[in-house]
Image (cartoon, rainbow, N blue to C red):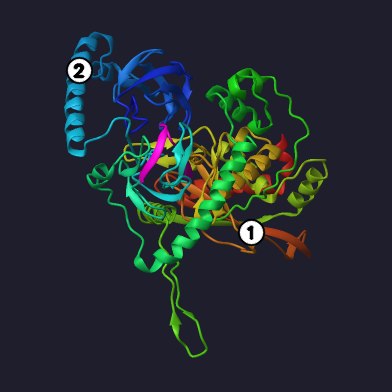
């Protein structure tokens, strides 16, 4: 069924947007997470990603045109689908005059509302109220992890004000305004809904007490017992974070590249850190990526640490014995936004998707020999987890029903393979996604996993890098776990749990010999994947793992 995509509200003050560039054209295949267009708001030109998959059937706002928020931007659906009814509901040029009238009325109401607000808060000239931003498509509230500026600091447009923890990642939040930071509405460690008063910026010395009193945040305050402890930690973390940001800026750690350059680099497996930009202020453009010749790459400094999704049994803080006298001592740790979302989504998955589990034992002797040969090549390092990911991607192409997702009206079978790799981080778990995994080589998979895992641990992943997975791999083998079961990472239909390689007696050609085996457990959603389908997938996966040379064919 076709989906209408409207002009998004990309900033707290945006009422209309201009399409600067379309990166897709009518007829193009769209995957969830693809960049559709660059949209110019009242504050900046931003990339707009698709939250749907299908074919781009219609473009409602052409390049250079301006339209109100919620105007028809595009329609995505199945190739050849009839969208005439949707176009009747959302006319474009025929009702421009009506739109203008509606826009004019809306502007008038906005002005009246603005006037009322101005009267109620006596908003001084040059003062800007900054609200809690919506940094991901599923974000409803956010937690201020760290303030990088304090009241009284001078703010320039583009300065990083704070690090904000969303339901997906901890992200840097930049200022779109210049002035002095006059007021902070949400303190470090506090949580508040989107659009709550975050800060006030304006001319130095301006009295904003009336504005602050007139806005209610609803932020969750830290408990009195923990305030004193948190203040010391917050100061220490703030100093460290500020130093990190300063270091990143001085070392040009942030990558400035056009959306098209980023897309081409992703498709070719090119790390943009190694590309020199020829655009304005060193911005990487399309030609820079196309002309880039990979040189001898440095071995990634950060080792990947894939991990599992949350265990099937909920873990709780257990009382611990503090002294030999048997005194009970407990510690109450505030749940982070990430931990709350993990709890919510995995609970939804466990109690809505009928899970069942299939296990298979794989002989790893040939895989171990193949890995040794591959890693003997200079500047090449492939892990067993990389082999599992590659084998999974190839098996999914042969068994697309496992690469699916359940919807009430239809089952979506994905013919592209995007594998999510579960990575343990300090606060919980994130699942960065390898786009088009089946088209990647083993070395590309290894390099990408290391890069994503490293940035996940440094809280540098973007939401787009954790979206669009069609299947998930979770590995606890490096911790000595022989076998385990995982909770499905919805909307996926399956997740593969990878155990440790174990040396043990095995029967080969009628003789007992020493061999190396590994347990693989597939958790399936019975709504989409029947037992026979899951079993056939595991058989194919086993064949690839036991004969790695077939993955190179």
Question: Does any portion of residue 422 appear in the rendered image?
Answer: no
Q: Is residue 248 left or right of residue 409?
A: right
Provide residue 338's location: percent of width, then percent of height.
44, 52
Task: Give the extent of the magenta segment.
Answer: 170-183
- In this figure, which residue is indicated by the disc labeled 2? 104
At mark 2, the secondary structure is: helix
Which quarter of the image is occupied by the N terminus?
top left
Task: Return the residue at label 1.
Answer: 477
Which quarter of the figure is the C terminus placed in? top right
Quadrant for residue 209, please give it.
top left
Q: Is residue 441 shown in magenta?
A: no
Q: Main secondary structure of the magenta part?
A: strand
**CA separation, marks 1 and 2?**
62 Å
Q: Nearer the viewer, mark 1 or mark 2?
A: 2
- Which of the two labelled residues, at mark 1 and mark 2, occupies the earlier sequence position? 2
Q: Position of residue 114 (x, y in %)?
A: 21, 30
- Give the side of residue 139 with respect to residue 508, left or right: left
Residue at coordinates 74% horizontally, 43% vertically from top-left? Answer: 299
In reply to whether residue 175 is colored magenta, the answer given is yes
Residue 19, percent from left and from top: 40, 18
């Amino acid at each position: 069924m076709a989906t209408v995509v409207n002009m998004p509200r990309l900033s707290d003050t945006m009422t209309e947007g201009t399409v600067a560039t379309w990166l897709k054209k009518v007829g193009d295949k769209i995957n969830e997470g693809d960049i559709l267009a660059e949209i110019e708001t009242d504050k900046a030109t931003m990339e707009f990603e698709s939250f749907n998959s299908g074919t781009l059937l219609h473009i409602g706002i052409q390049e250079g045109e301006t339209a109100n928020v919620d105007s028809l931007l595009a329609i995505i659906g199945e190739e050849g689908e009839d969208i005439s009814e949707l176009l009747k509901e959302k006319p474009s040029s025929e009702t421009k005059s009506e739109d203008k009238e509606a826009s004019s009325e809306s502007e008038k109401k906005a002005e009246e509302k603005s006037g009322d607000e101005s009267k109620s808060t006596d908003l001084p000239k040059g003062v800007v109220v900054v609200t809690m931003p919506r940094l991901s498509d599923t974000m409803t509230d956010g937690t201020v992890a760290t303030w990088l500026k304090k009241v009284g600091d001078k703010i320039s447009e583009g300065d990083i004000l704070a690090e904000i923890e969303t339901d997906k990642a901890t992200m840097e939040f930049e200022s779109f305004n210049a002035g002095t930071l006059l007021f902070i509405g949400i303190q470090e460690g506090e949580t508040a809904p989107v659009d709550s008063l975050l800060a006030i910026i304006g001319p130095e010395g301006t009295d904003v007490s009336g504005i602050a009193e007139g806005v209610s945040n609803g932020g969750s305050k830290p408990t009195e017992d923990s305030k004193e402890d948190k203040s010391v930690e917050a100061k220490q973390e703030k100093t460290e974070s500020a130093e990190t940001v300063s270091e990143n800026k001085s070392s040009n750690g942030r990558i400035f590249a056009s959306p098209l350059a980023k897309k081409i680099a992703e498709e070719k497996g090119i790390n943009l850190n190694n590309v020199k930009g020829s655009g304005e202020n060193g911005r990487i453009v399309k030609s820079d990526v196309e002309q880039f010749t990979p040189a001898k790459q440095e071995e990634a400094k950060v080792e990947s640490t894939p991990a599992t999704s949350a265990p099937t049994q909920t873990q709780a803080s257990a009382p611990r014995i503090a002294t030999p006298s048997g005194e009970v001592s407990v510690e109450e740790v505030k749940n982070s936004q990430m931990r709350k979302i993990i709890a919510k989504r995995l609970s939804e998955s466990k109690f809505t998707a009928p899970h069942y589990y299939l296990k298979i034992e794989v002989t790893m002797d040939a895989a171990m020999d193949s890995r040794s040969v591959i890693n003997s090549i200079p500047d090449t390092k492939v892990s067993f987890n990389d082999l599992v990911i590659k084998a999974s991607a190839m098996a999914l192409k042969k068994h697309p029903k496992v690469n699916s997702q359940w919807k009430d009206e239809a089952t979506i079978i994905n013919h592209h393979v995007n594998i999510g790799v579960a990575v343990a981080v300090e606060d919980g778990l994130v699942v960065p996604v390898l786009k088009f995994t089946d088209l990647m080589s083993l070395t590309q998979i290894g390099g990408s996993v290391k890069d994503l895992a490293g940035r996940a641990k440094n809280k540098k992943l973007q939401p787009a890098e954790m979206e669009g997975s069609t299947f998930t791999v979770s590995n606890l083998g490096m911790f000595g776990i022989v076998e385990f079961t995982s909770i499905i990472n919805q909307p996926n239909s399956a997740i593969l749990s990878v155990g440790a390689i174990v040396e043990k007696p095995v029967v080969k050609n009628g003789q007992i010999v020493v061999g190396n085996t590994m347990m693989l457990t597939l958790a399936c959603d019975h709504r989409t994947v029947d037992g026979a389908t899951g079993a056939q997938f595991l058989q194919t996966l086993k064949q690839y793992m036991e004969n790695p040379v077939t993955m190179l064919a």
